[in-house]
Image (tube, rainbow, N blue to C red):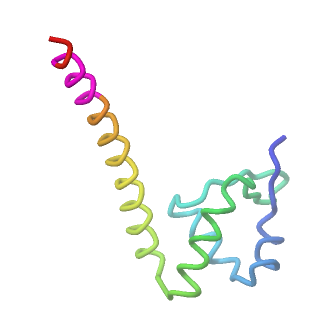
Amino acid sequence: MSERISREELVKIYNIEITFFDELVDCGLLKIQTENEIRYLLYEDLPAFERFANWHYDLEINLPGLEVIHDMLQKMEELKKANQELLKKLSAIGDRYEDI
């Protein structure tokens, strides 16, 4: 079983509203596990939760803003990976021409 923390523990530890957690789940920003009607967040997803909580409470970014930022960061990461692949291909092509 993966390490996880309950929604109720998160609310106490991070001093957030339970509705904020539920809204993150409802809009798909967090994935949870449910067991015996208790919602759990996997420890591996804790950094994303902390980032959303910080942006929301410290920077006063609303839920739609969190969604936009999250989507943009995901797209930037995809573009970064695509760019790295293109650079590898370009390097391989350049290596072939150097051998001629």
The residue under the point 32% across, 40% down is 82
User: If the image is split into quadrants, where does the N terminus sit?
Assistant: top right
Q: Position of residue 83 (x, y in %)?
A: 29, 42
Q: Position of residue 3 (x, y in %)?
A: 82, 50
Residue 64 position by quadrant? bottom left
Q: Is residue 33 magenta?
A: no
Q: Main secondary structure of the magenta part?
A: helix
User: In front here: 5 or 89?
Assistant: 89
In this image, 68 relative to 90: left or right? right
Vertical placement of residue 44 versus 63, above or below:
above
User: In front here: 18 or 70?
Assistant: 70
The residue under the point 66% across, 56% down is 45
User: In front here: 69 or 39?
Assistant: 69
In this image, 15 relative to 98: left or right? right
Residue 30 position by quadrant? bottom right
Q: Position of residue 9 (x, y in %)?
A: 83, 71
The residue under the point 77% across, 71% down is 10
The residue under the point 75% across, 79% down is 14
Q: Is residue 93 magenta?
A: yes
State which region is magenta. Answer: 89-97
Q: Position of residue 46 (x, y in %)?
A: 69, 61
Check the image and name the residue furthest to the top.
100
User: In front here: 82 or 87?
Assistant: 87
